Each structure stands twice: as C-alpha cells, then as structure tokens.
Image: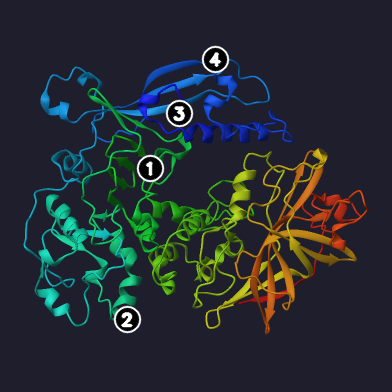
Amino acid sequence: MTRLAGCTDGMGAPRRLGKITRAAAIVDSLKDGITNPQAPPDDPDAGVRKIPAYHNGRVETVVLRLERADDGRQRWSYALRVACVPESTVGWDVHHELFAELKIAKDLCSRTSGGDSYDELDMDWTIPEIPTSVESIDITRTFLDIGNPIYQDFVVLREAYEESPLDSRYVALSHCWGTARVITTTKANIGDHKHGIKFESLPQTFKDAVQIVQKFGLRYLWIDSLCIVQDDPNDWKREAARMADVYRNAYFVLGATRGKSDAQGFLRPRLKAPGSAVLGDFTFSPLPPLPRRWTTGVDMMRDEPLSDRAWCLQERYLVRRMLMYGSTQAAWERAELRASEDGESIYEEGDQLSRILQTANTGISVFGDILPTPWNKDLLPRRRETAVRYADWYRMIEQYTTRNITKEKDRLPALLGVANALGAITGDDYVAGIWLGGSLEGLTWCAANRDGLDRPQARTGPSWSWVSVKGPVQFPIYSWYDYSEGWEFGSVRFEPLAKYIEHSLADSTLHLVAPIVAVTGHLPRPTIQPADTERWLPEPQFSPATDTVFSFRHQSEEYWVEGAFGIKQRHGPEYSLFGIFLVRVPFHLGEERFDRRLGLVLKMTGNAYERVCFVDSYILKPDITDDGHRFSNLSTDIHVFRSLKVAELSDTEPSNTEDTLRLDRVQVILK
C-alpha cells in the first residue's frame, strides 16, 4: 500500500508507504527474472513526484468493504482506496500501480444525534476517546460475557483456598513495573496486605485494573508484584514455576499495554491514529501496507511499551483470552478470534501456546525425519511442511531477544511458564533455552543484525546457547527452510552433520559428534557479490548476518566459509580457532549442485570448546584477479568469492545426497 504525493494530500496518508511498496516490487522482479540483477532500478526510495512514469498517470478511487471475521458486532469495515496508475507498466523500471487504503469510520457523535443517512451501511464507529466509555466497555463485554460491577474501597490479598467463592474467576494483569518503586508484597507486610490495601495507595495501573475488573462484574485480580512475596526466594521460585497455570487459567488476562510504568496507568484518553483526518461525519485513517497489518499476522501491539518487556512475552503466549489497552484502541485475543476496537477481526486456529505446541510436537523436522509423537502418529513419508519441529518456539525466541529485561539472571525464568507447558506435552528435555529434540536447530543462532551482540556482565548460560548473549538473535536454518519452500520438490534438502550425544546440567556442557576443522585464518568478508552470472545463486547468497570469512584446509586444499563473530568484543589472535559443521544444505539448480553449511567457530578452553562465531555459507574459493593474486595470499585487492559446485569438491561424480567434503567426525564438548 502506498500514498501518492499530490493525489490525496487531504487524507494524510504517510508518504513512506510508496517507498516500501516500490522497493518490494523491485525485489520481487529481481527474483522473478523481470529486472536485470546487474542493473536494478536506481529510484526505489524516490518520491512519486520525482518518478516521471507517474507524472501523467491516472488517479482511481473506490470504496472497499474489507473482509473480517463474524465477531458478533454486526458491522462492516470500509476503506477508501486511492491509486495512481502509470502510463505503462512494461519494462525494466518496475513502475507498478501505487495505492493507499484509508479506513473509514463514522463519527461516534452522530450515533446519538440521530438522522444518520448512512446507517444502512452498518459502518464501524470511531473509537471513543475514553477507554472506559459505555461504548468501549460494551464492545469488550460482547467477547468476555461478564456481568454487573462490584465496588470496594480495599483490595485484599487472599491465600488460595481460604474460602470457596461461588464465582472463582479471576483476571491476571500483564504490566510494566517501571523503574520507580511500586507497592509490593514482602515478608514484612504480607500480614497487612491480607487485611486490606487501601485503594488510594495503589499505583495508577493497579487502580485502572481494579476499575476494569469491577466494571466487568468480576471480583478477583492477580498481580505478580502483590501476589508473589518479592523478597522470599522460595515463594518466588515456586510461583515462577506455576506461572503457566496462573495465566493459562485466568478468565482473561488484562494487558496494560500502553503503560510504561505502573505509575502511568493505561486508561488515559486515547491518541488519534497517526495521519487521521475528519471529513464531515467520517474519519479517514491510513492503513499500513498489507504485509504490515495485524490482520495478516503482525502483532497489533508491537509498538506499545508492554511489547518491549521480556517477562510479558510469555504472559501473552500463555493466555486463553487477553484484553489489551493500547495507545489508540483496545484489542482482544482468544483461541478462535482476534479483534480490535476499530472493527477489524480475524479468525484464529487456536491460541499462541497451542500453535507452539503443535510445531514442538509435530515430529517433522527441517531434516525431513518423521518421529511418532503423542499428537502425530503418522509415520508415512510426506512432502516437507512449513510447520516443522520447534519452528514457532525459536521464532518466539527471536521476538523474546528483542525485548528488555531488568535482571539478566531472569532471562530463562521469564520463559519457564511456556517451557513447562511444552515439556509437559512433548516430554522433551529443555536445556538452557534449547530443546534437545531440536538441538541442531537451536544451536544455529546468530545476531539478527550487523549491530552484533553483547555478553551480559554475569554469566547467564553456556556459550552455545542464545541465553549467553544480549541482543536480538535469529535462527537462519528456519529462514533457509522457508525460503526453499517454493523450490522444486527434491531440489534441496537439509542434512544433519552433527549428532547429540549427552549433556551435563552440572557444568552446562553439551556433547556432540561433529566434523571439525582447524581454522587457518580469517578476514573481513567481501561486500561484492560474484559478478559471473553463470555462478549466480538465489538470495541469500551472502548471509546478511555474516561479516567474516574463515579459511581451513582439507586434503591439501584451502577452502573458505562465511561467518560472524557476533559478539562485539572479538577474540584476539592468541586463541586457536576451530570450526564444526552442524547442518549441510545440498541443492541443485538445473544440472549444477551446490553445498551450503551451517556451523560454529569455537575456541578451546581446557578440555572443552566455547562458541565464538557462527557459520552460514557456501563452500567458497577465491577468484583469480588480473594480477594473479589469490585470496589465500591475503591480497587486499581481492573482493570476490565464487561458490564451489559440489562436483568441484570431489574427484568422483557425487550422488544427490553424498557429502563430498568428507570430514572426520569426532566428539566435541561445548560449554
């Protein structure tokens, strides 16, 4: 979706959308072979006014009725589509139709003033400014089905089973504590809290939560800082272990999503949606590009403060129902449905925990093996599926590592609720954030961007685990798997090169059998892709996370692989480095076969190895330059590698599955 400069200036749609769509169109055309990869268009970020192809184009407008789930509100969602069509869409320049969609809503004031001539459209209303307005509460009540309010002047801390209420439903609060000290339950004041906490002494977020619970006719509220004795390690450990039950069994979880701290609260007047404009009785609000809409899978609360807190991720994943108050509107989720206050809604196939459980228990891995599990007893061979083992768990970890956490030692406890829920179903062993049933997949993590990773001040986990670092991580093995889904069946496969043997919880070691080589050198990775179109490979050819090339020798030949140290504090030359390969991805394009490897670079400390680098690479050899120098001579003017075909790695013609770079496998202890 994109806004056209000069076409709909009064609507306020963001101009940046045009750039996003144009750049995406160019990428698609490169993959489809429409655009010359050696001479792509040079204007992907230009404003529409600066692209001549659109100067004499025509403008088209139409009102759309958007698809939505049947959520009981008996309303329709409408959008105004404004498009600019170029004179011609033919040629290398990839000038597609550019358009914007703006959500249309009727002014809420016209609901009470009468005389609405558009009532037959059953159109969505604008969002009330006050979150606790009758209109807002009524919409939410439709989904949660709760009754009359009960008002009290005190909040009383109750022990479980002190009494047997007729209605034992409770609401659990998900919130940001903030940096300021808030009221908590301690060993010193637990007696006072059991007699009652005066409502006026609560921080604003707690007051807001009490107000919502009372308006919905419920009586019980669970807040971690009040219901867990914060200075009692035994109580904290016990409650952290049962966190899955607390959030899973709540009638619903209330998300104070917009509150940066408990002092702020979350029921303040709502902000207007960015770029909104009022025309008569209607409000027009620009919709984001389709791939970035929450109705296509993007988290609708991704930019809210609560989505930046690590502890709150599992609270979001464990719930059966959740009501969230964001900066511009409320939203709710349950197993069958997700909906927002502005009228959008989509169907769901189970809640988030159920979806993680399904992929954790599928029995089908990226390697194509099929294992019997309690949920999947089908042992028949099948085509590869996207929902492979632990894919959703490790995607959750990618989200988790983007979030902040106050105490680094809490990085594993903050996921313990979800881990316990998965372990209870799968029976798999969970070690330092990695499932042994997906150990190779879990070991293939790396920095998610070029900013690199940091080490926490205190050790938080073994070097082989993502828990040992600070910063966003990714698991490229799943990206490669998803990327190859569109390829011809049988043209690519994932082969494990290493095998899990055992682990020790006492010293956090992981024992593998894997091929290992001595690293003979490393240099910054070239930034230029191979220019020879005969050796052109589909993206990603150079992994975006890699920044270094490592050399090793095998049978008197020198080879190179790409990798990334990842950690900002790099290890000096005093360390001897070794490389192990975990996964091999052989594939063929036409008559040619290529070989890609995922692995680790290690340093030896004592009788074990520590991880210092990640490998994601084809097997590489340097091209010869005009002056005859090769990269193996460390010549600084060599910038291009070529990817070796499988046939170049062996004197004999290989089969489709044979590993032609035969390396001895030995036992490797990681710590």
Q: CA distance from mark 3 to mark 2?
A: 55 Å
**Label 2, on which residue?**
233
Crowd class of label 1 (few under 14; some 14 to 19; many from 20; radius 10 Å): some
Q: Residue at x 54, y 15 (%)?
A: 56
Q: CA distance from mark 3 to mark 1?
A: 30 Å
User: Which residue is depicted at the point 31% across and 59% down?
Assistant: 248
Q: Which mark is residue 56?
A: 4
Please state which of the two labelled residues, at mark 1 or mark 4, is closer to the viewer: 4
Circle 2: residue type: Pro
Please, what secondary structure does the residue beneath circle 1 have? Answer: loop
Mark on residue 348? Answer: 1
* 663 in relation to 7, above or below: below
Q: Residues within 10 Å of mark 2 (few under 14, many from 20)?
A: few
Amino acid on which the number 4 mark rests in the picture: Asn
Residue located at (73% from left, 73% from top): 577
User: Which label was assigned to residue 3?
Assistant: 3
Q: CA distance from mark 4 to mark 3?
A: 16 Å
Query: Of the residues shown, which amino acid type is indicated by label 3?
Result: Arg
Disc 4 residue crowd, few under 14, some 14–19, many 20+, Cα 10 Å:
few
The mark nearer the N terminus, 2 or 1, is: 2
Please identify the quadrant where the C terminus is shown: bottom right
